[in-house]
Image (spheres, grey):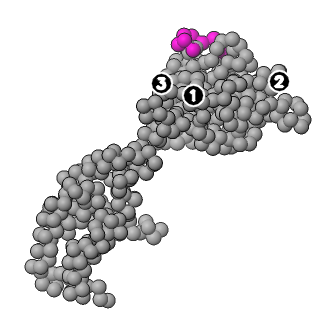
Amino acid sequence: MKELKKMAVALAAVGSAVSAMAFLYGDVSDAKHAWAVHDPHRANPAKVTPADVPGQPPSDAIVLFDGTQKSFEENWVDAKGGKTKWKFVNGTLESVRRAGNICSRRQFGDVQLHMEWQAPVKVQGFGQGRGNSGVFLLGGLYEVQVLDSYETDPANMKNPNYPDGQAGAVYGQNPPLVNPTRKPGEWQSYDIVFHQPVFEGDTCVHPGSLTVFLNGVLVQDHWELEGPTWYLRRSRQVKPGTTKGSIQFQDHGNPVHFRNVWVRELPCRYANTTHGTYLAKEQDVAALRKKTAATLAAKLDTKNPGNGIRGILEVLSYDKDGYWTKYTEMKQAYLDGLARLDAEGIKAKKGEIFAIRNDLNLLIRNKVFPENCGFRAAIQKIITDNGLDKK
Ligand code: MG
């Protein structure tokens, strides 16, 4: 609450013009962060309308299967891009033996994926042969296992299975953290966040990751991919390849059903080179800071000296070198203006003068200005000489 109040006061103090919305407020941008803390100049997040019912697609989702034959035929093909032999049955997709994987026509990179699946009501087979399918990302490279894993406890010997091949596993790499599977025949949900590996040239700078919720329970906690998922073979990171591919459901010979499939395309988080992550590149950060400085400098309030000086101080926080000359001129003009005022005139500007002192303190704390900043000393002298800080 205290912070909200402070922000409200800061906003109120500078009037309603959006271009002069806040001046300096939180710790400023730096070599690894293009934006200040609580920076009002950052892009506002896009508005998304969530679904009324959990599990249903929000407004920005791409719906790949909504239970209609139309969405089946429009969005799904076989591995060669032709008509799939999978069946549309009672508003669901059914895996058909030897039909091959079903593939989204559209290609995706990093995604949030929701889908629901149902292991066959009629329990047949054993282990990897019981209700086996899978969700493949990036054209088949990475599998989140779909399997009837309801009774996998080795002690009861009903349906033991290797842990890294159970439902919720990143196949062959990491078992689910827990086993929240429902009985065969009951619908189960996956919510998957997939980030593909990031390469610089041939070097993998981040392996990519899978986060998976199975029936609302976290089973993969940002698992960093060792490479594509394999049967029997230890996975290893491959060379960079395609950055987009189909979402696929596996044909593993069992009639697994699917419904309610939608995705949201995600930015590659490691493509953020301008703020905060260890992949932030100083030249990219500097370029964006310069751009912000230029935008703010173009909107400087030239009519109100107080707003003007606070504005140029904010500009300096993004690009000190680029606007130093302008700052020096504006600072001198501002101090000259104060020097022409009598004691009453100075007193009338108390709020503005204190705000400038706060801005300078912030810039000193953030090492934009040195401790012995001359402007800060000049402002403090005016405050002291005029008794502005006396109660
Ligand atoms: Mg499978």
Point 68% across, 25% down: residue: 233
Label 2: state its secondary structure: loop
Give the residue number, with chain letter if any, for mark 3: 242
Label 3: state its secondary structure: loop
Left or right: residue 300 compared with residue 66: left
Q: Which amino acid type corresponds to the residue marked 3 in the rendered image?
A: Thr
Point 25% across, 80% down: residue: 380
- In the rendered image, residue 166, in percent from the top left (x then y), is placed at 74, 32
Numbered circles on residues, count: 3
Q: Is residue 106 magenta?
A: no
Left or right: residue 305 compared with residue 206: left
Give the residue number, with chain letter if any, for mark 2: 126
Q: Is residue 271 above or below residue 366?
A: above
Among the two numbered marks 2 and 3 on one chain, the one whose residue lies closer to the N terminus: 2
Q: Residues within 10 Å of mark 3 (few under 14, many from 20)?
A: few
- In the rendered image, residue 262, in percent from the top left (x then y), is placed at 56, 31
Magenta stretch, main secondary structure, is: loop
Q: Nearer the viewer, residue 133 or 326?
A: 326
- In the rendered image, residue 369, in percent from the top left (x then y), is placed at 28, 67
Image quadrant in which the C terminus is located: bottom left
Q: Which amino acid type corresponds to the residue marked 2 in the rendered image?
A: Phe
Point 25% across, 55% down: residue: 319
Point 18% across, 81% down: residue: 346
- In the rendered image, residue 238, in percent from the top left (x then y), is placed at 54, 27
Give the residue number, with chain letter if any, for mark 1: 137
Part of the protein shown in magenta: 79-87
Q: Residues within 10 Å of mark 1 (few under 14, many from 20)?
A: many
- Alpha carbon distance from label 3 to label 1: 12 Å
- Alpha carbon distance from label 1 to label 2: 26 Å
Q: Is residue 86 above or below residue 296?
A: above
Marker disc for residue 214: none
